Image (cartoon, rainbow, N blue to C red):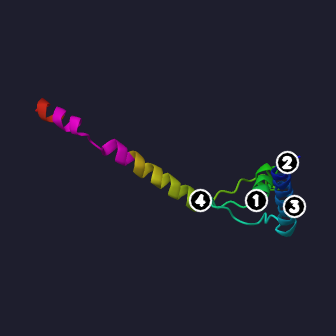
Amino acid sequence: MPTLHRLATLRDDVIFFVYLYQTFAYKVDHTRVNEFGQGGDEEEVEEKLANRPLQAPADGAVVVNQEIADEGIAKLDAKMTSVSTKTTGADVAGAKRRK
């Protein structure tokens, strides 16, 4: 076997052992947050919460936060009125021609 090939093989072995040492010395931190703001452990917790069966109150009554519901309805009404009252340039030109 040529000497250069032996050195290349030895180099590969050394790199492999360095890799093994680093994986042993530096464990993966699953609680660390990545650049997208997501953590490894949080996904499991969110999945557990999402997959949990729904639980109704014992008396069967549905509780709704009326304040939030009223605010949502008010925002929806405001959007609907602003959309219905907007006029475009074509509408104005058409109204001028009709006069």
Q: For the residues carrying marks 4 and 2, which lies nearer the camera in this image?
A: 2
Find the residue positioned furthest to the left: 99
Quarter of the image where the C terminus is located: top left
The residue pinned by badge 2 equals 2
Please tell me whether mark 3 or mark 1 is closer to you in this view.
Answer: 3
Whole-Å distance between the Cαs marked 3 and 1? 28 Å
Q: Badge 2 local density, few (<14 within 10 Å), some, or many (20+)?
A: few
Q: State the separation of the CA atoms marked 3 and 2.
A: 23 Å
Left/right of residue 41 with respect to residue 13 in the rendered view: left
Residue identified by numbered label 1: 40
Tag 2 or tag 4, which sits nearer the N-term?
2
Amino acid at dot 3: Phe
Q: Kindly state the secondary structure of the residue where label 4 is placed.
A: helix
For image coordinates 72% across by 61% down, the residue present is: 39
> Which of marks 4 and 1 precedes in the sequence?
1
Badge 3 or badge 2: first in the primary sequence: 2
